[in-house]
Image: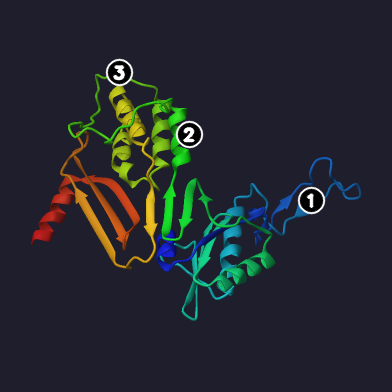
Amino acid sequence: MLLAYACLSGFKLFPTDVKSAFLNGLINEEVYVTQPPRFEDHKLPGHVYKLKKALYGLKQAPRRWYERLSNFPLSKNYQRGQVDKTLFIKNSENEIILVKVYVDDIIFGSTNELLCQEFVLDMQGEFEMSMMGELNYFLGLQIKQLQNGTFLNQSKYCRDVLKKFEMDSCKEASTLIATSCYLDADEHGTAVDQTKFRGLIGSLLYLTPSRPDITFVVCMCARFQKNPKESHFNAAKRILKYLKTNVGLWYPNEATLNLKGYSDSDFAGCKLDKKSTSGTCHLLGASLISWNSRSKHAFLYQLLRLSTLQ
């Protein structure tokens, strides 16, 4: 969503990193720690330290760090997002700055460069930070910011997954799954290594943020992780063949802000539990901002359909 809005607004995004983030959290509880081995105070060897700030390993550390980090932009007249609580927004005379926080990594961008500079100075005055130039890689996502839009993909991760499962020299597949293929428990099929199959499914799920086209089939294969068979593993390997084509998400500039949504569903398509599989996607202008695929009970879908008809 942040990428889509940034592209539509015509401004670039920049990453920054807070050094030793959890050590910045102020704790309210009384916490005492023993003196580190070989660093004891020779005058007071039997004493302990009372902590003023959090340490790595304390269960309070993540909560206290985020509390301090979120309170700081709020004190600078930023507003917290209503849906995404890690998004902070500030409006200033028809200009806007967006700040997205993920633990100690921060992405920010603005329609006015002066607001970016002001944010950097404020943060550097409060925390020890490192600036990394224009955003091009974040949480495994490769981001290419161009004049006419932004391209987001995970091509490097795709290559690593193909190499990990020895599929880097395979032929490309133009489709994810055969139209006549309906996966079931395959109780009489040949069993495969559960660990390898689950590792493959986990790797594919990590790709869904930039490859919404594989979400449905990956989730279908994920249903058989408890007792995977050779047929399930072959279906998952076909997804790897499909990933040989390097595609991603394109967020163009100067698009409209019309929000459109699409949904579709089958009826009792799953052979195991007779559940329906539904999928939805939402676009802001021409930019895809959210999507999902999930299974639901068929009778619930039928009730919803009947209530809609009435």
* Mark 2 secondary-structure assignment: helix
On the rendered structure, is 236 left or right of 143?
A: left
Viewer-closest of 239 and 268: 239
Q: Vertical placement of 94 versus 245: above or below?
A: below
Separation of marks 1 and 3 at Cα, in angstroms: 60 Å
Give me the residue at 43% from left, 50% from top.
152
Looking at the rendered image, the quarter that the N terminus falls into is: bottom left
Find residue 212 and report its horizontal and vertical position in percent. Answer: 33, 47
Separation of marks 2 and 1 at Cα, in angstroms: 48 Å
Outermost residue, front side: 147
Q: Nearer the viewer, mark 2 or mark 1?
A: 2
Q: Are marks 3 and 2 in contact (CB under 8 Å)?
A: no
Mark closer to the chain start, 3 or 2 = 2
Q: Quadrant of residue 285?
A: bottom left
Mark closer to the chain start, 1 or 3 = 1
Crowding at dot 1, Cα within 10 Å, few <14 / some 14-19 / many 20+, comes out as: some
Q: Which residue is mark 1?
A: 48
* Mark 3 secondary-structure assignment: loop
Mark closer to the chain start, 2 or 1 = 1
Give me the residue at 20% from left, 32% from top.
182
Viewer-closest of 198 and 235: 235
Q: Quadrant of residue 202?
A: top left
Give me the residue at 13% from left, 55% from top.
305
Disc marking residue 36: none
Q: Which residue is mark 2?
A: 160
Viewer-closest of 246 and 229: 246
Amino acid at the residue labelled 3: Thr
Separation of marks 3 and 2 at Cα, in angstroms: 27 Å
Q: Which residue is mark 3?
A: 190
Amino acid at the residue labelled 2: Asp
